[in-house]
Image (cartoon, rainbow, N blue to C red):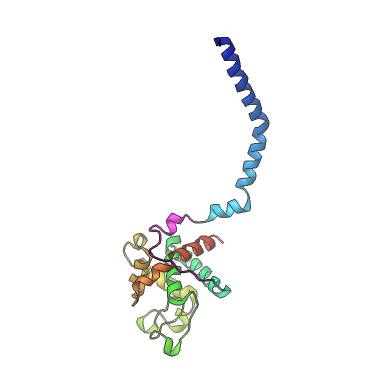
Amino acid sequence: MDSKLLRRSVLGVAGLAFAGGVFAGPMMQAEAISVTTSPVAAVQADKPDTGKLMPHGVQGAQSRIDLSDEQTGNVKAIVVATKKAGMGERAAVVAIGTALQESKLENLGHLGDRNDHDSQGLFQQRPSSGWGTVEQITDPEYSTLAFLKGLKQVDGWEDMPLTVAAQTVQVSAFPDHYAQWEQQAADLVAEHWNS
């Protein structure tokens, strides 16, 4: 093939590509706009990054429970209190994971003989240990802010696995039990952080 014929072929293909771009371009752009502005894409873009929520991944087997409206309301209260405390998504994951272990996200009152001393509320905080009055620690916002105040005092909590950060604040007899809730806690924060 001589150079003139080759040059005409290349220009012909380039011309078709250009013409295709002119005619297909606006349609392609319209499709791209509709995809990026769809409600599903907007919601996904608003979800926190999994790397922020679970920087260490999960440790061990994970547990999961179905939540009632009351439990979901408590998740939302924890998220709101975390934002009020000026803390980020990871703090909310630690708080929700802790509350999942301590109370299954139920705002528990005194359980009589089944009670662990005088522990109450979402985080099973004890009035006798200085967490606040019964009325305070059974208020989801107060109890979350109290938990987060303790968490802030733990040097390097952001870099700790959830179970270590939670245990440092809670001083539980079962320190490794918090780890099983990390995935569900992260999922709940992803779902409710921007809602």
Residue 92: x %, y % from top left: 45, 65
Q: Which residues are magenta?
A: 48-65
Q: Residue furthest front?
A: 1
Percent across and percent down for residue 164 are 34, 67
Taken as a whole, is the magenta stretch helix, strand or loop? loop
Viewport quadrant of the C terminus:
bottom right
Residue 142 image offset from top left, x and y in percent: 46, 75
x, y (%) of residue 89? Answer: 45, 61
| Residue drawn at point x = 32 percent, y = 61 percent | 156
Furthest residue toward bottom: 113
Q: Which residue shows up at 59% across the image and 12% down it?
A: 5
Indicate whether residue 54 is drawn in magenta.
yes
Does 177 sit left or right of 193 as displayed?
A: left
The foreground one among 22 and 133 is 22
Q: Which residue is depicted at the point 42% across and 71% down?
A: 98
Q: Quadrant of the N terminus?
A: top right
Q: Residue furthest left?
A: 155
**Residue 88: in sight, yes or no?**
no
**Snapshot quadrant of residue 166:** bottom left
**Residue at horizontal 43%, vertical 87%?**
114
- The question of residue 23 being in magenta is answered with no
Does 153 sit above or below residue 8?
below
- Where residue 34 sits, quadrant-wise, is top right
